[in-house]
Image: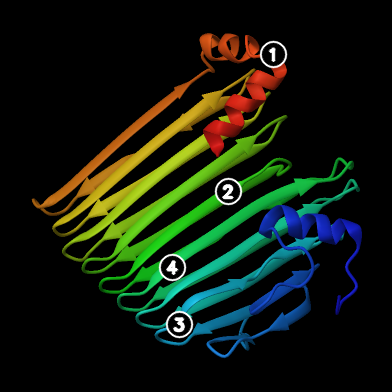
């Protein structure tokens, strides 16, 4: 391996990006606010920003079948890391972007990472974006993640975004904003797990400004113990368009979940739908799995994994 990564570093990278060693192709790995290692490819250039901490990722028109990795890990107690990453995706591309942040904190001081990501999707490009957040450590210090995602989608482009929060994140406020032009399509899937006294807020604003644009927002969350979740999506239809917002949550213990799906039509040709459901695990599901030999705890865990899978 070209760089010296500790077992903690390696575990974090495996959790958030399924990276084992240095990946092939284009990648940028950041640890405790500093660059670990970076590689560009023939079609994907990664360069350091000159105005803010962070990177510019420029993808040549026509690039297909490539993946770029940009994970961040934080192991330094008391660190507040802020990074601005911009993605310039050329026309007619078909690429995958794997991001995410993992925090290991064994101290009593808070560790925080705030990632501000901006995507500019060229005409007829296809993008798959996966972002995972994860926290671990024995200390009482908070593990804080506050991501901001801004998306501008040009004519005929499509984007699938999978935003995932795994265990161990003390608090998070996620802001997601998107503007879709003619025939652009966005599928936004959010998966969230909170436990203990954790808090999580997800705000979304999706603007459908082009004829034929569409968005599907799918939120699946599990709130355990005393955790608190707030889901606040808004889809605005300003042209002939389609939008669907679906929020499903499982609540356990003394947790609290608030879902406020919103739709706003500014065109008579906009077709917008929202729905929300919050409830506990059905008892018959647990009983059925227990008849197959699982304990009650194992059955519950199996149901939750399937729900968030």
Q: Is mark 1 on a helix, strand or loop?
A: loop
Identify the mark at residue 293; answer none if there is no mark: 1
Identify the mark at residue 218; answer none if there is no mark: none
Q: Quadrant of the N terminus?
A: bottom right
Identify the mark at residue 63; answer none if there is no mark: 3
Q: How crowded is mark 4: few (under 14 residues within 10 Å), some or many (20 or more)?
A: many
Q: How far apart are marks 1 and 3 (CA)?
A: 49 Å
Q: Which marked residue is nearer to the observer: mark 2 or mark 3? A: 3
Could you tell me if the residues under marks 2 and 3 are in contact, i.e. CB atoms within 8 Å? no
Q: Is mark 2 on a helix, strand or loop?
A: strand
Instruction: Tell me which label, 4 or 1, sits earlier in the chain.
Output: 4
Q: Is residue 9 left or right of residue 176?
A: right
Q: Quadrant of the C terminus?
A: top right
Could you tell me if the residues under marks 2 and 4 are in contact, i.e. CB atoms within 8 Å? no
Instruction: Tell me which label, 2 or 4, sits earlier in the chain.
Output: 4
The residue carrying mark 4 is 127
Residue at x-position 68% and y-position 36% = 198
Q: How far apart are marks 1 and 2 (CA)?
A: 30 Å
Q: Which marked residue is nearer to the observer: mark 4 or mark 3? A: 3
Q: Residues within 10 Å of mark 1 (few under 14, many from 20)?
A: few
């Amino acid at each position: 391996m070209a760089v010296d990564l500790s077992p903690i570093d390696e575990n974090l990278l495996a959790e958030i990006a399924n990276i084992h060693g240095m990946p092939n192709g284009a990648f940028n790995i950041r640890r405790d606010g500093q660059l670990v290692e970076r590689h560009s490819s023939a079609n994907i250039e990664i360069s350091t920003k000159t105005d803010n901490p962070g990177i510019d990722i420029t993808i040549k028109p026509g690039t297909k079948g490539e993946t770029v990795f940009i994970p961040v890990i934080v192991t330094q107690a008391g660190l507040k890391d802020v990074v601005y990453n911009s993605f310039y995706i050329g026309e007619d591309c078909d690429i995958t972007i794997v991001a995410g942040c993992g925090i290991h904190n064994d101290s009593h001081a808070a560790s925080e990472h705030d990632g501000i990501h901006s995507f500019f999707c060229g005409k007829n490009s296809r993008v798959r974006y996966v972002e995972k957040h994860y926290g671990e450590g024995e200390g009482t210090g908070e593990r804080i993640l506050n991501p901001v995602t801004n998306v501008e989608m040009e004519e005929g482009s499509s984007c699938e975004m999978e935003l995932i929060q795994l265990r161990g994140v003390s608090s998070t406020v996620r802001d997601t904003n998107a503007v879709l032009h003619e025939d652009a399509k966005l599928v936004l899937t959010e998966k969230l797990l909170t436990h203990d006294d954790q808090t999580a807020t997800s705000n979304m604003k999706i603007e459908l400004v082009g004829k034929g644009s569409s968005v599907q927002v799918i939120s699946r969350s599990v709130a355990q113990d005393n955790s608190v979740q707030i889901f606040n999506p808004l889809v605005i239809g300003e042209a002939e368009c389609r939008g669907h917002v679906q929020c499903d949550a499982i609540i356990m213990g003394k947790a609290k979940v608030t879902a406020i799906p919103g739709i706003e039509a500014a065109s008579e040709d906009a077709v917008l739908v929202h729905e929300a459901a919050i409830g506990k695990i059905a008892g018959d599901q647990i009983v059925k799995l227990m008849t197959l030999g699982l304990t009650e705890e194992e059955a519950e865990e199996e149901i939750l994994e399937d729900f968030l899978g």
